[in-house]
Image (cartoon, coloured by chain):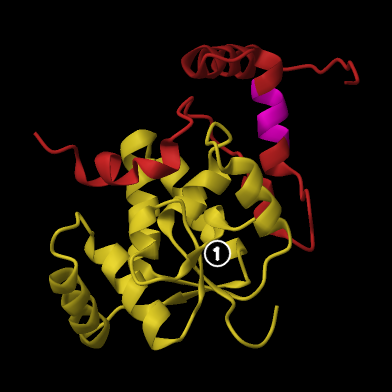
Amino acid sequence: MIRTQISLSEGEYSAAKREAARLGISLAELLRRSLRTALPVNDIHPWMRYAGMVETGDARSSQSIDDVVYGRKD
Amino acid sequence: MAGRTDAYVDTSALIAFADRSDTYHPLFRRLFAAPPSLLTTTLVVAEGHAWFLRRYDRTKALVFMSMIEDMTPLTVAAVGPKEQLGATDLLRRFSDQDLTLTDAVGLHLMKARRLRRCWSTDRHLGLTGVSLVVNER
């Protein structure tokens, strides 16, 4: 990791802090994620920037899609 | 990437690729990093979009749509009456299973286009004997 300093407006800072708190991550992690989305990570395979774009915390996430999309059976 | 389609892509493969918590995320990250020619359907895209909408919000759901647009090796096939008919036959054949119409259309397309591989974590997509990439060594 490389440490760096950036300057944000007060509005940007408080909005970023709020979003980080909502996602349960640090401000630094939020900025890293934002950067990953903004940068042309891979010009040959541009879809790779979406790899791991979310973190549900559910190891079986891809196996419970029907429950989320169609709802669980009673 | 050109030439014959190599595999069918199910919603679960797209979610496993996007969700870094998923057990199969490393596998699909690796597979999508060097993909062959792939096929999916508008129903799979609709399911993926709905998953992001339900689980997150409309912004994330739109990011998912951008992901699909950027995935140029992935062809999104339209689903019409012919595909629906083929899928309904499969729903009747496997009426003891909780198969969704999206799954059944996928099974029908794999059969119609003679695809032997499926990128999915859903066992339903292996019902007709197609090889699921998660079971390959």
Q: Secondary structure at mark 1?
A: helix
Q: Residue at x 62, y 76 (%)?
A: B37
The crowd level at tag 1 (other Cα within 10 Å; few <14, some 14-19, many 20+) is some
* Residue A34 part of the magenta segment: yes
**Where is residue B95 drawn, in percent x and y?**
13, 64
User: Does B107 appear above or below A25?
Assistant: below
- The reply to whether residue B63 is in sight is yes
Q: Nearer the viewer, residue B43 or A12?
A: B43
| Chief SS of the magenta region | helix
Q: Residue at x 27, y 69 (%)?
A: B104
Give left or right: position of B77 versus A51. Answer: left
* Residue B125 part of the magenta segment: no
Q: Residue at x 18, y 37 (%)?
A: A72
Quadrant housing residue B25: top right
User: Does A13 appear above or below B110?
Assistant: above
- The reply to whether residue B78 is in sight is no
Give left or right: position of B59 versus B4. Answer: left
Q: Nearer the viewer, residue B20 or B6?
A: B6
Chain identifier, yellow in the render:
B
**Magenta stretch?**
A30-35
Q: Quadrant of the N terminus of chain B?
A: bottom right
Give left or right: position of B59 versus B35. Answer: left
Apparent colour of chain A: red
Q: Residue at x 29, y 64 (%)?
A: B102
Q: Which of the chains bears the disc numbered 1? A: B
**Where is residue A48 drawn, in percent x and y?**
69, 52
Give left or right: position of A24 versus A38. Answer: left
**Where is residue B15 drawn, in percent x and y?**
48, 47
Q: Which residue is mark 1?
A: B69
Q: Quadrant of the C terminus of chain B?
A: bottom right
